[in-house]
Amino acid sequence: MADHGNRTKKILIAVSAAFLVLVVRLWQLQVISGKELRKESEENRLRVVDIYAPRGIIYDRNGIPLVKNMPNFSVSVIPERLKTANIQGISALLGLDPAWLTRTLAAASRSVEPVKIKDDLSFDDLARVEARLSDFPELTVDVGISRDYIYGQTAAHLIGYIGRLTPAQAESPEYAGVSKNSFAGQWGIEKLYDKQLRGVDGKKLIEVDAMGREIKQVGEVPPKKGQDLTLALDIKMQMAAETAFANHTGAFVAINPNTGEILGFMSKPSFDPNEFVPSISAANWKALIMSDKHPMLDRVFQSAYPPGSTFKIITAMTGLETGIINTGTKFNCPGFFDLGNHVWHCWRHRGHGDISVHNAIVQSCDVFFYNVGIRTGIDPIAKYAKAFGLGRKVGLGLGPESSGLIPDTQWKEDVRKQKWYPGESLNCAIGQGYVLVTPLQMARMIGAVGTGGTFMPKLTFLKQPANAKPVDDPIPVHISQNTIDIIKSALAGVVNDPAGTAYRSRSSIVSISGKTGTAQVAAGVHAQTNAWFVAYAPSAKPEVALAVVAEKAGEGASSAAPVAKAAIEAYMKDIHPELDKTAAQKAGKAAIGNGASMPQMPGAFGNKTGIRIKKAPGAPANKSGNTAKNVRTGFGNKTGIPVRKHAATPAAENKNNAD
């Protein structure tokens, strides 16, 4: 009996102790840790879910949408089930690699957000997943907002594309508060104006069950839509240029020389930004970056080219401003120019005969500009080239930019550790040799010429209000009005004089002024040339200025000028619907250059060219209005200019093709 009593006593003591421990534990949970546990329980019951903000729409200058927002469906694994997910079943359902899925979930084992495992579901995929959600409680379907680029490859380098936040962006203070699953601009306008376009994501508080599934919504902070943007881009002009450019490689860029607005922007070959949303496949990315055409290169401002004969505008200005030439100065062109023991050729092998600066620009005579270049030397040419923005970055903000190169004697001493030879001035005078420019620089340069020597230091992608001031104060280039008038008259003749190199690209609805260029990029048997054309319109009061370069496409007159004509006409029709052939015919005719007639066009040529040419001081006029100051081609002792003989540089023997 005693033993039985002892056992009973021990059992009672043990039960009492266990009960005491339970009471103490309950007291600890309810009193000491109650607040923390209630918070943890609440967090397990409630979840914050992102509501993605609609991205702002990008429009062209006429209100035509260039992009649109689209729903984006994705599948994620909820945080509560990361460690118990059915790897094999999910992989089979979504067509995923089980090994990849295992690694992905393991790497995100401590995530408090759903882990995205498949993006951009098609409607068929979405229907299949929705039908099987009861079999996979660890899965959830998310609805986001993606992008559709309406015009595909058209203006792709300008518009750009979006993509999921990169790791670097996710860590950047600039993206603080932005969900790592959000889209952000990764290229072009989408990236440059990402903060304005992306808006502010909202949040919603939902109650979930033990399986992590939503029961009901508890609260919501609505998202704020991103800001819409209206670009200065004219999509009709852009499409006209791209159609005319066909399958060439190169670039086209157009600006309003009065406001600095960028009206057209093309780099070819291009890419389809839709391939990057939500993310580009490894195979497609490899194809883009391995292509020998380099479609991801923005040739508008990242490629620097020899400008060829378009640079003769600068050389002519230099000669006129330094007094080396005037309207009456003529040089004889027999088709070549000899200097020392070497010969430089004109594109017209039979020569141009005695020719003045006006006709030398109109017909693009190389020999005339060899004569100017050898007399001025490189340093004055470099001075005026730089004054018009050549040789330095424009500063668009879209990415790394080429500054091009405007050489001078100091540059060669500093970089090449060599002195400058006279033969190198000949090459540079016609836009060959060391001279390199970007299409964007050339568009800005020709715009400054068209507006009478007003240089636009800053350009803008956004449409400016009517009558608004330029985005930055224009800088006047210190060029005399007389020089500007002479150059503008000649540029009008390039397109409208039957002897002009771009006569075939004259327009019946608007007067175009411009300069062709054919820049040699490979010599010998396999000689190749880049085709250039720079232009502005209307001639008397420009509203658009542009540059076109087509790589290894032959002559500027045949490959580049027609692109400019198509773009200019599309733009002018867009902003001046009244411009048509009937209006042009009613306007009458005007004499250009040597007396040839052409249709008179709105804003074009008034009395004759509409561009006043002042007679150079001390230049007696002959019947043509020019002086008869003939100068022998080449250099012997008769010119009075000493020339030191030297071994020519490899680029010295230029065999420039027709412009």
Image (cartoon, rainbow, N blue to C red):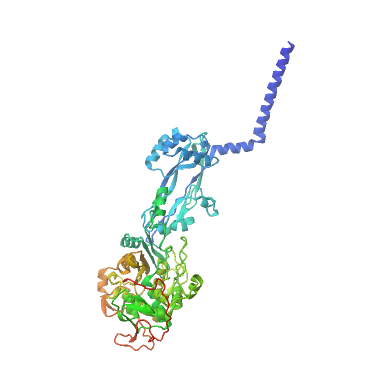
Quadrant of res 501: bottom left
x and y, in percent, of residue 51 in the image: 48, 46
Horizontal placement of 222 versus 565: left or right? Answer: right
The answer to whether one can see residue 523 in this image is yes
Quadrant of res 390: bottom left
- In the image as oriented, which residue stretches furthest toward the right? 2
Q: Nearer the viewer, residue 118 or 33?
A: 118
- In the image as oriented, which residue stretches furthest toward the top? 1
Q: Nearer the viewer, residue 504 or 531?
A: 531
Residue 490 sits above or below residue 290 on the image: below
Quadrant of res 522: bottom left
Residue 429 sits above or below residue 161 on the image: below
Q: Nearer the viewer, residue 359 or 539?
A: 359
Residue 2 sits above or below residue 322 on the image: above
Horizontal placement of 112 versus 298: left or right? Answer: right
The residue sitting at 39% across, 87% down in the picture is: 617
How many marks overall?
0
x and y, in percent, of residue 543 in the image: 37, 70
